[in-house]
Image (spheres, rainbow, N blue to C red):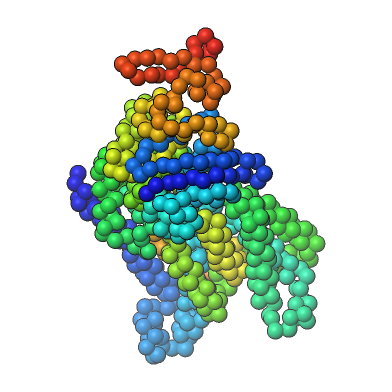
Amino acid sequence: MKSTELVQDYSRYRSRRILFILLVFLGIIIVGMYAVVVGAAGISFGDIFRVFTGTGDPVSEQIILNIRLPRVLAALLAGLALSASGTVMQSLLRNPLASPFTLGISGAAAFGASFAIVFFGSAGFVLFPWLSDQYLVMFSAFAWSMVSTGFILAIARYRGATPEVMILAGIAIGSLFGAGVSALQYVATDVELAAIVFWMFGDLGRAAWDDVLVLSLLLFPILIYFSLKAWSYKALQSGDEFARSLGVNAFRVRLTGMLAASLATAVVVSFYGIIAFVGLVVPHIVRRCIGGDDSFLIPASALFGALFLLLSDTVARTLFSPVILPVGILTSFIGAPLFLFLLLKGMGRGYWS
Amino acid sequence: MNIELRNIEFAYDKTPVLQNINGRIEPGQFVALVGPNGSGKSTLIKCINGILRVQKGEVLLDGNNLETYGSNRLSQKMAYVPQTEQKAVPMSVFDAVLIGRKPYIRFKPAKRDMEITADILERLNLASVAMRDVNKLSGGQQQRVFIARALAQEPEILLLDEPTANLDLKYQVDVLKLLGSLTRQGITVVMAMHDINLAAMYSRQVMMMKEGQLFASGGKEIFTAENVEKLYDVHVETIHKNGTVYIVPDRIHSI
């Protein structure tokens, strides 16, 4: 084979991966429109058109603009954040089991939410009069997940930011906060206990325009940062020393990458609760489709995760309509068998494939 | 470009690993770094590359201290092939080798980067597997991928940490021949190695390391039974055949 042919071959391979990204994007638009239309209250495509041209009736306007649309956007943004974070963490930690929750983020957020529910339940208004109950829980979940992240990054700074140190520290912190949640549940009243359990189901029914706005403002800089660092992440996949020989500061790149991924995850979790498996499984599905080159894998995973969560949420809303299931239950129901299937299919191919 | 090592010292925490290393390597030289496990070969290679910072002394490239080169510029001059990767990279061979172009790429690889990559794959007989996953290749092919990735950096100096470990005899010879041909193109090759006979066969300059110090250095003529016995603390005998000396463990003492 001549090398010019090889370049052409490779260019075609690159185009195929770009095509994959475009197809997923198309899928998002199609499913997104369907998700606005489908649901307990009947809305038609015509209604969407009329609402956006300002001639719709007030009821469908209310449903589309204040209920369906923020929920669809929240699903997309949360899926984007969780999958992009999962992909980056798997590359940075060179571990297929890394997920947005690796640094104990879900455990810490659950602890934070329970903490606010148990201790500030009704006292919240007195202590923080400008915060509503809901925001107090959100804020506490976020603060505690950043505490856990900060703690692990501090250990990593002190002990060397190797993947092993960060993963093990994450496991330890995760179980510590898990015990904390159990302790709080033990002392909680029945009502508080119900609130804790309810919070822990990841649920996009909490979506509102405010958090959609916050999410997008935070996510887009992080995604751009990830894309700019894709070449460093690729070098890191072959080991820290090799990365250093390519001029990559392995320590700093890993630390800032983990911080950015944790930040994105913590915000999603504190808004919507724990949505499991998206960040773990989506990178594996996409890696199977287009390979592990971070330049393509990060954007493709991010978009595929958005599509996956939107689909899951749409199914969760319509499966037992008018009863709406929390999407966090459904992602695990879809995610776990899918992950097992991938694992079985991947046998003998090296577990990183 | 030439490499000069001046009084290099390096320690992990308080344990000294390298002490008092001096040496000079000319452009296009083929250097074998030999010595027992733990003698500091890998550490020396990492110090020359700047992956580890020497604590005393200095590494000079063309007379300038290593640290005066920016990390990106350094990675255009010098490439490193690590000792067997702990986990293969989950991407295609072409993608993996293209990573070596990182010092020249800001965001998106240019046509030139792909052409250079394709050319190297061609030269290293990897063209037919270019679109396959690295982790589906044999050990010998993977090692060639990692050498190809280093060559994509267009380095003047190539540092390899045991490039023939885990390879069968044919692949070992293949890799060494390849490295030899690179030195004829003016690339300096410095490699750590365990097989002293293969090292003697292919290299032109030898640095023997023991307990973090340079035990002996010079041309191939320093591969004497006496030196090797002292270096590895084993009894050896020499076999002379067709004008070449082979050093093997002494049969009486080894069994």
Q: Is residue B220 visible?
A: yes
Spot occupied by residue A167 in the image (x, y as percentages of width and height): 60, 51
- At 54% from the left and 11% from the top, the residue drawn is B253
How many labels sit on residues? 0
Left or right: residue A276 versus residue B108 is right
Residue A268 position by quadrant: bottom right
Task: Tell me the quadrant of the picture where the C terminus of chain A can be found.
Answer: top left
User: Where residue A316 appears, x then y in whole percent?
Assistant: 51, 64
* Farthest bottom residue in view: A55
Task: Name the residue located 51 percent from the left edge and 41 percent from the top edge.
Answer: B22
Q: Residue at x 66, y 73 (%)?
A: A139
> From what the image shows, is residue B7 above or below residue B231?
below
Quarter in which the N terminus of chain A is drawn:
top left
The residue lying toward the viewer, choosing from A115 and B187, is B187
Please provide percent x and percent y for residue B89: 42, 46
Query: Compared with residue B78, is residue B223 higher up or lower down, i.e. above or below?
Result: above
Residue B97 seen anywhere in this rendered image of the structure: no
Residue A296 % position (x, y): 38, 59
Q: Nearer the viewer, residue A139 or B124?
A: B124
Residue at coordinates 52% horizontally, 9% vertically from top-left?
A: B252
Q: Residue furthest top?
A: B252
Foreground of the two, B147 or A85: B147
